[in-house]
Every structure is written in C-alpha cells, then in structure tokens.
Amino acid sequence: MIRSRQLEILLSLLKKKKTTYKQLAQEFEVSTKTIERDINRLSAMGVPVQCIQGKYGGVSIDEKYKLSASFFTNEDIQDIIFALTAFDSFGKKQCKDRILKKLCMIAPELVELLESDAKEYFVCDLINEKIDMQSETCKNINECMNRDVFLKIFLDNYKQLVAPISYVLKPEGLYLYCFNGDYDLISINTIEHTEITENEFIRDFIPYKENKKFSR
C-alpha cells in the first residue's frame, strides 16, 4: 500500500522530472535514508523511478509515465476520502482539502461525488479533543518510526528511551505504542518533550492488536 509521503514524492517527481535524494529529504523533512526507502517502495510497486549516481545523476521518473486513473481504483479513492474525513474530524490541522485537490488531477468528477457522499452519509464522532499530528512530538515520533531509531521521551520530570512502534487512537485520545524493555502505551498528551537518537532498533515487535497485555 502506498503511503502518503510516497504519493507526495511521486507527485513531486512528476512535476520536477529530476531531483536528488538530498533535495527530496529537505523538501519532506526526513533523512536521505528514508527517501531511499520510499523510492525503493515506489519502484517495487511498478513506478518507473530511475536513480543515477554521479555528478550528473539524480532521481527521475520516466517521461512517458503518467499518473492515470488506473493508479487508484474507485474503491481506493472512496477509502481515501472517507479516511481523510475521519482524520479531519479529530485532527487540529485539516488535510482533506489539500489532498483532494491532488486526487482531482486523476478523477475530478468521482472525487467530487464521493466527497459529497462522505459529508452527507459519514459522521465520525470519536473523541472530544482535537489531535495535532503536526506537533513537534509527533514529528519526532514519525522520524524515529521511519528511521527505526530510538526516541527519548520526557514525562513528568523523568525520561525514557523507547522504540516507537505505532500510534493507537482510543476514545480518550492518541497514544504511542512503544517498547522500552516491556511494551507500553503512553498518552501523547503526557509527553512533555522528545529527542531523536541515532541508536537503531530492529522492528520485530508484537503488533498492538496481537499483544495480549492490551487485549480486552
């Protein structure tokens, strides 16, 4: 499944035609290793991304490649719109309109119809307090997840070194599912400060839904 940042990278390559790992890393505020992994994932999905090393090299996409409606099925677009509608219901910063403008480049009439359906038939009322996924805390968590490196978190005058595994959205708010010698679930609102480390970990953890410690 294509991730949001990978789609953004694809759209950027279609617009610029040629760039570099370093420029993409600066544009998306991630490491060059993360960009390299994203490019590899796009290539594995059949996107003709070309990577040439050297002074006149860089990252480019085949000029004949076009992002057509066949890239997403109608069901894909519907799922994206409903997911964006759900996210906007609890996110502080709205992202649906920005992303829908890009989807309209592929299937404008379908996007407009499905967006209308989402507004009329889909109501998401999960939590009372809005979540800021663009906060410094979440950005640092995301960076550590992308790079598989430990995150230092500060909680009420003490600190922990954790391997961030995933976010967990509960009725009470957003939590970080992580490992620090044992599996833990930490409310994002209780985290006072975070620091990214350079210490890598191997991602072989028990997924949240399979962890009996948190199963109901």
Image (cartoon, grey):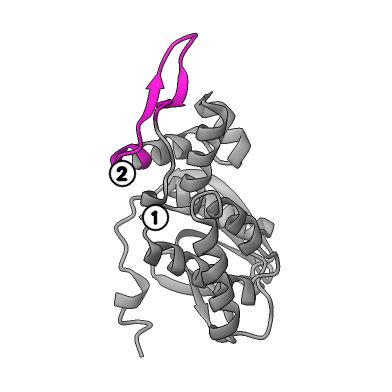
Amino acid type, callout 1? Phe
Can residue 123 be seen here? The reply is no
Q: Is residue 114 above or below residue 31?
A: below
Q: Which residues are magenta?
A: 42-64
Of callouts 2 and 1, which one flags the residue occurring earlier in the amino acid sequence? 2
The percent position of residue 145, horizontal first and vertical second, equals 47, 53
* Secondary structure of residue under mark 1: loop
Tell me the quarter of the image containing the C terminus.
bottom left
Pinpoint residue 12: horizontal percent, then vertical percent: 55, 37
Q: Position of residue 42 (x, y in %)?
A: 37, 41
Residue drawn at (62%, 36%), measured in percent from left and top?
27
Residue 81 numbered tag: none
* Residue at x 69%, y 81% (from the top left corner): 129
Nearer-the-camera pick, 209 or 196: 209
Q: Secondary structure at mark 2?
A: loop
Please tell me whether mark 2 or mark 1 is closer to you in this view: 1
Percent coordinates x, y for residue 108 in the rendering: 54, 57
Viewer-closest of 73 and 188: 73
Q: In the picture shown, does residue 198 fall above or below 55?
A: below
User: Residue 43 versus residue 26: which sits nearer the camera?
Assistant: 43
Q: Among all residues in the image, which is located at the extreme front?
A: 109
Residue type beneath disc 2 = Met
Q: Residue furthest top?
A: 55
Callout 1 crowding tier (Cα within 10 Å): few <14, some 14–19, many ≥20: some
**Spatial separation of the CA atoms under disc 2 and disc 1:** 12 Å
- Magenta residue check for 208: no
Residue at mark 2: 45
Tag 1 residue:
72
In the rendered image of this protein, does residue 95 appear above or below residue 29?
below
The number of numbered badges drawn on the structure is: 2
Q: Is residue 54 on the magenta stretch?
A: yes
Q: Quadrant of the N terminus?
A: bottom left
